[in-house]
Image (tube, rainbow, N blue to C red):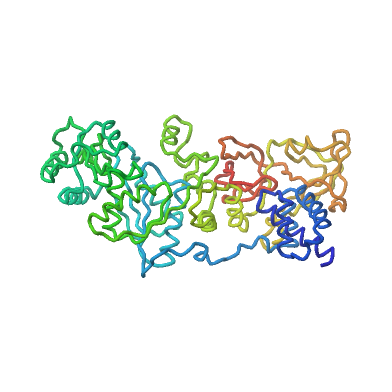
Amino acid sequence: MKSMDYRSLIEKTALKNAHGHDGKADVGSVMNKILGEFPDERKNAGKLIITVKEVVEKINSLSPEEQNSIIMEKYADILTVEKKEQEHRLHDLKNVHGRVVMRMAPSPSGPLHLGHSRMAILNDEYVKRYGGELILRIEDTNPQNIDPVAYTMIPEDLKWLNVNVTQTVIQSDRFELYYERARDLIGKGAAYMCTCEVDTFKDLLMKGKACPHRNNDPESNLEKFQEVVEGKNKDASPVLIIKTDIEHPNPSVRDWIAFRRIKGTHPRTGNRYTFYPMMNFSVAVDDHELGLTHVIRGSDHISNTEKQKYLFNYFGWEIPEYFHYGKISIPDSILKTSIIKKGIKDGIYSGWDDVKLQTVCSMARRGYQPETFRKYWIDSGLREVNAEFSWDIFNSINRLFIDPGADRYFFVKNPVSIKVENSPEINSRIPKYQGKPERGFREYHIKDSPELFITGEDLGNIKHGEKIRLKDLFNVRLENGIFRFSEIEPSKEKIKIIHWCPAGSKPFKIEKPDGTFDEGFIEPLAVNMNGIFQFERYGFVKKVSDDFGIYIHN
């Protein structure tokens, strides 16, 4: 391949790499990509790496806006979102015989967060692939961990994520069903009532020894169960235990608690019920009663799956096909509902959609797109190994979806006023989107020797005697603290390009994900526009009013 062809290919590869990684290309990644496409050139790797380093260094010295200008002019296909058949990105489910029935089972302790979206989208993708039912089952059998707003917010979050729920089930509506199945198990001799002290019971299990109540006859167990259900013996602390293998190698699977008394008023059932089913009991019963064919859940539920299979075997029910995916750790995130609730109460967060949080409603408010969530989780796949969530990749995916529709505007952070001496009267014509003239232009009539605003940071970085370009306006030179007009046409030599705002620009405030604010001026033509925009040399912002916006990412 010719050297110029090489350089063009390297430039394109470096720009693509930089575009997906916050404007910074990686030499190793670019080199591997080139050699992957042209393996015969490995013999010239020593010479090739020199050129790659030169090109990457040049690309990384450019601002994101300058990089985008080159992309739009020479390599516009980089910005094209590949329309891949997403259903082929996830492996096939085992033992599919026709339509599938799957479920999402959040607790109503608060709205959904970023981690929950994985569960929702993967289930939705499989139901779309095979056809069938996707059940939203709200697991609200712990009155001490319920926020009533979640009953409304969870369905709203799923709707925003474009997850198609075909049936909604709320477990607190199903107490009588759980009691009926408990009586059936007691009658089979597969469950027993226990009033041992908690520590005593745990100690016996750890030693592989039976509780003294384990061999009580079904009739007495049924009688005691009914007394507790009816609210009698309120001073006792009875539990219903499922018989398993008392010597099971995993102590957590040994005889486990199916029901316990919980104090507290339930937001939907009040004080009608006090003997509550535990998760492993209600989940197993519902998975059967609702006809679940496949269950995908986190690897932290492997022991729970083994516990629940005891109920399926006692009743002779068909066991669903289970798949346990690895845990995803999400760095720099606040997901725990108890922390968020306390933060809201203490005034640290303005609500569930505070921009400092990673709830689905917060991320929607900030400007993330539902398509971003779906593409990220599908691309990540359904894997059994643990992994770490990548904000860089997530943001690069979101950028692909919002960039094509985001017009460009100038926001000058921490503005300082400058006066340009000896400049002519001029009409500035700034593209709303570089390389797409059909999108229109932002046009300003700039008087001679005008007052303009630039960022304080840019001003501090301009050296005496240095020539710079005010983007889409003209070139100026700083001499003895005074900006003097140089020429209108772009300089052939490489000089800094900075953005600016004209006189008459309006104050604007941007809230950032860390809770801080950036303040400055926004150009006049952007004032009455709301939506998602790219503020050049700053980042993507969701503008929600004339004077306020929310930062999305760079």
Q: Position of residue 340 (x, y in %)?
A: 44, 36
Residue at the spot 66% in from the left edge and 52% down from the top edge: 408
- Answer yes or no: is residue 76 visible: yes
Residue at the spot 89% in from the left edge and 38% down from the top edge: 465
Is residue 190 or residue 285 the one in the foreground? 190
Q: Quadrant of residue 401?
A: bottom right
Given the current orientation, which residue lies at the most extreme bottom position? 98
Q: Position of residue 464 (x, y in %)?
A: 87, 36
Is residue 179 or residue 345 the one in the foreground? 179
Asked if residue 183 lies left or right of residue 383, the reply is left
Q: Position of residue 88 (x, y in %)?
A: 51, 66
Q: How many marks?
A: 0
Residue at the spot 29% in from the left edge and 50% down from the top edge: 170
Is the residue 426 above or below the residue 513 in the image? below
Is the residue 451 above or below the residue 387 in the image? above
Is residue 244 or residue 55 the one in the foreground? 244
Is residue 270 or residue 4 the one in the foreground? 4
Asked if residue 35 lies left or right of residue 148, the reply is right
- Answer yes or no: is residue 140 visible: no
Q: Quadrant of the N terminus?
A: bottom right
Q: Position of residue 8 (x, y in %)?
A: 79, 62
Q: Quadrant of residue 436?
A: bottom right
